[in-house]
Image (tube, helix red, strand yellow):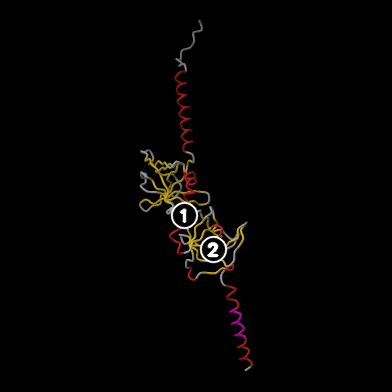
Amino acid sequence: MASNHAQTSRAALMALAMLVCIPSCRGKSGTQPAAGEQVLQYGIVISDDANLRIDPLLYSTRIALLNKGDRVEIIEQTKDKSTAGKLSDYWYKVKMGKGITGWLFGGNIKTFKLAQAESIDSYVTAIYKDEEKKYRKVLSGKWWSVDIRDDYTNHALELYEDGKYKSYLRGQKEIEGDYSFNYMENELLFSEGTSFGKNVKYSKKGTVYRLETKVDGWNLRFKKIVDDIEAEKAEKDKEKEKEKKAGKEAAKAPVDSGKQPDKNQ
């Protein structure tokens, strides 16, 4: 009888311990998980090179760098705010388009309620219009298509800060026109088409920008080889002028007939 009573008491104590543990163990770092990872809010990244981390801590491992204007889905939020520099905000667990999840500090994100989904496009457009001048500058230059080994192939694309472009196959006629931005798709649109028949997606990884598209199911990537096309053109013109001048000077030089001077003169 006493043994049965002791076993009952132990069972009661274990049950009590489990009840105490459950609230304190819910969620990592005081987080409040969303059941089934349902979307709680939408978010737009408002900082360049925002760190997506594995845990809601400043010193946690970085998973990826997000860019200003990137869209995410918020699936979890920390219970308490944290401090980063002069900012105090929550951490948000977010899901990116490719299914990658991680934690983003609240100072790097603007949140939208699910009912505000329609206003996100206009907000992103406003961000990119402010950023357009910067994008035109960093993307301007000469780009050349490359294969999986990063060897150059056949398509060239020249982008200029004033919104003009040239597209051509190696050694063939240039296509010229104006390019514009499709901010919703991170895409460059070309008014007169391209030698590869497509628009291109632009993206940023760290400090490196990329251009790519798909042609007949294959990825077509471009590598930037010249930042300042005008400077390159000026340099080539300078070299041509030097060669032209050297040619003129060579034409004026006396021709050696091969005759030996007469010693009696």
In the rendered image, which residue does mark 2 sit on?
92
Question: Looking at the image, do the residues carrying marks 2 and 1 touch, with CB atoms under 8 Å apart?
Answer: no
Along the horizontal axis of the image, is 257 left or right of 173?
right
Q: Check if residue 58 falls in the magenta segment.
A: no
Q: Is residue 232 above or below residue 181?
A: above
Q: Could you tell me which residue is drawn at 56 percent across and 66 percent down?
A: 78
Along the horizontal axis of the image, is 214 left or right of 89?
left
Residue nearest the observer in this picture, 35 or 197 = 35
| Three-letter amino acid code at the position of disc 2 | Tyr
Residue nearest the observer in this picture, 206 or 107 = 107
Residue nearest the observer in this picture, 229 or 115 = 115
| Three-letter amino acid code at the position of disc 1 | Val
Image: magenta residue range: 10-19
By secondary structure, the bulk of the magenta-drawn segment is best described as: helix
Please state the horizontal and vertical placement of residue 123, each as a whole percent of the image.
47, 55
Mark carried by residue 124:
1
Q: Could you tell me which residue is drawn at 49 percent across and 41 percent down?
A: 227
